[in-house]
Structure formats: C-alpha cells, structure tokens
Image: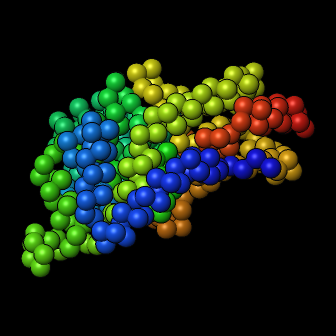
Amino acid sequence: MIPFVDLKHIHQPLLKEFQNIQDTCLKNSDFVTGQLVNQFEEEFAAYCQSKYCIGVSSGTAALFLALKALNIQAGDEVIVPAHTFIATAMAVSQCGAKVIFADVDPDTWNLTWEKIESKITQNTKAIIVVHIYGNPVDISPICQESKKRNIFVIEDAAQAHGATYKGRKIGSLADLACFSFYPSKNLGALGEGGAITTQNEEWAHKILQLRDYGRSDKYKHEFIGYNLRLQALQAGFLSVKLPHLDHWNQERRRLISLYQEYLKDTPISFQVVLKNAQSVYHLGVIRCADRDKITQSFTKNNIGYGIHYPIACHQQTAYSIYNSLSLPIAESLSQQTISLPLYIGLKDEELRHITSILTTDLSLI
Ligand SMILES: Cc1ncc(COP(=O)(O)O)c(C=O)c1O
C-alpha cells in the first residue's frame, strides 16, 4: 500500500519539540494569541520577506479578513480563478461581494492578465490570484495593470509556502497574501491555522483588530469584528516546523523531477512552471486524457491518489447561477487531472513502482 499522503515521516522526528510547545502552553496558560503567536508571526513575516504577518484561524479566515481589510462588500466584484479550492471563492461570497470566475492558462493552470482583463468591470475591486499546487502565478503584469485601475491584488498562497517568483518569496508580491496551515499543507499546523502577510501597516493593524472582535483595548471595540484568532499551540508547532520548510520543499521538487523523468515518454503532462519561478509542488498533479483508467489501476494496486479538483468552482451547486458559464480550461482540468502520492518519506523505489504501473500495467496510456 502506498498512501496518497503520509505526514508521519515529518512529524515523528519533531515529537519532542511538539511536546515542549505543549508544556510551554500549559505552564504559561497561554492558549489564544500571546507570545507563541507573536513569535511565529515575526518568523513567518521574515521568511516571506514581508513586513507584517497576522496569524488567524484558517486559510479561509485569512482570505475573508484580507477582503474585509480592503473593505470589499456587497456591490463589489472580485475576480478569482475557476480552478482552485472552493475557499477562494467562498471568502468573497462571505463578504457579500460578487464572485467573478475567470478561466486559467492551459499550461500553468493559473490566472494570467489576459484571462483577467476581459472580466474587469467598473465594479471590480480586487483579484485573488491562486498559486495553484504551489506554482507561482505570473503576477508582475497583474499587479501593474491592476494598480493603473485601482484594483487590489491578493495572493491566495494557501498551497505555496516558500515558492519564489523573480527571486522573491510568494507572500510578498501583492497587496496582501493569505496562507493556510491546514495539516497537509507544505507548512501545516497540527490542526487549523492560517496567516496574512502584507507590507502595509494600516491593513495589518486592521486585520489584527478584525480577527479579535474589532478590539482596540480589552473591552473597547471600534468596529464589528470576528473571533478568527490563531491558537498559541498551533503557532508554536508552526515555529518548530518552519526551519525545515525549505528542505521539505527541496525534497518535493526532487520527487517531482523523478516523476517527470520516468514519465517523460508518455502522454502525461505536468503543470508548466515559469522560468523565473520555483514551485513548491504542494501536490504532484498530472494531466491525462483518460483519468479513469489510472484511478482504477491505482485502486487495484493499492496506490493512493487525489483529485484536485473534480468539479470546477463555477460548476458547483453552491454557485448554480454560474453553472452555464463556459470556462473550458478549468473544466477540462477538473476532468483530466490526478494527484500522485507526494510526501516527505515517499521512497524512490515506491515512486518507481507507481510510474511503472502508469507506463506498463494495462497499457494505461
Ligand atoms: C487554494 C486554497 N485556498 C484556500 C484554502 C483554505 O484554507 P483552510 O482550509 O485553511 O481554510 C485552501 C485549503 O485547502 C486552498 O487550497
């Protein structure tokens, strides 16, 4: 049995350090925000080459609060890719704004300025670009063109911790960036967590208050806020894991290059990474016309896999008003992609076994 993902390999060597964090929390009775959260926020801001980092309760909360900080509300339109996890779109809907789905590039599977431009109206207030599977979006032209039009750009970096674009870290490239620390993410908590990074002091301050009931002092509340804070325990666990992130990302890149090497003479294709960018391969996604044959064979051979994502966002029931929209690339990706096992601890011989099933067994492809 080769699972789709297995977090034990990265957690096992860190158990003692996790235990120390738990002891610190218990000793200090410091459970929500506080010292461990401040420390992680500083470390993660520095890691992302960003001035500010605000820890929050999840990646979805990060997106919601980033939009709130920009005062996005009913009547506003926010452009998002149709090929993403649904949280990107739902955060916009939670603010009462209108989601505008755009198609993605057939090679990078990301938004491009060309795909965005035709969706802009006088109501467009923001664009959320998603570095899908850890692959950086070509964000410079998007930021340049958006600035001319007074449109904000938010990075959904939920899958891209540590990725780089033009030598800079993802999370420092647009107005605000949103991270998820869901356990299986490249940098994952041992529960829920998220963060926002920004260079802008005003927004950072606003988000600090928004995550905590609009609080300016213990019982002083300046505006309607929320309880979307990061737990101290999770921040502590994240501080333990952060120093290992670059090494883990490097190993993901090595595993992907092995997959690419072994599958190079097949009709299987991989996501294209820009020349001036480095992906962190949150997922090992391949594209193939006949996905069902592969999934059936994987099931028979006890190999785990994932599908990210089987229904394009605009085709979800939750977005039924958009179901008749035609966004062909996002739609075909939802039919043709499959995520291969990819995790720290996946052995080279296991990867070889997976690819040999793909290339020989059942003349799959
Ligand atoms: C692209 C993307 N955006 C947002 C989120 C939401 O993050 P969370 O699950 O921490 O709320 C995720 C999580 O899977 C994601 O992959």
Residue 21: x and y in percent read: 40, 59
User: What number of labels is visible?
Assistant: 0
Q: Nearer the viewer, residue 99 or 31?
A: 31
Q: Is residue 160 left or right of residue 323?
A: left
Residue 181 sits in quarter: bottom left
Residue occupying image coordinates x 42% and y 34%: 163
Residue occupying image coordinates x 13% and y 75%: 218
* Quarter that holds the C terminus: top right
In the displayed structure, 306 sits above or below 19; it is above
Q: Is residue 248 left or right of residue 130?
A: right
Residue 35 sits in quarter: bottom left
Q: Nearer the viewer, residue 187 or 283?
A: 187
Q: Is residue 258 left or right of residue 136?
A: right
Residue occupying image coordinates x 27% and y 64%: 33
Q: Residue 125: in sight, yes or no?
A: yes
Q: Nearer the viewer, residue 299 or 21?
A: 21
Residue 174: x and y in percent read: 26, 39
Q: Nearer the viewer, residue 316 or 341?
A: 341
Which color scheme does this rendered protein use? rainbow
Residue 253: x and y in percent read: 56, 30
Q: Residue furthest right?
A: 362
Residue occupying image coordinates x 78% and y 43%: 294
Residue 172: x and y in percent read: 28, 38
Q: Residue 103: in sight, yes or no?
A: no
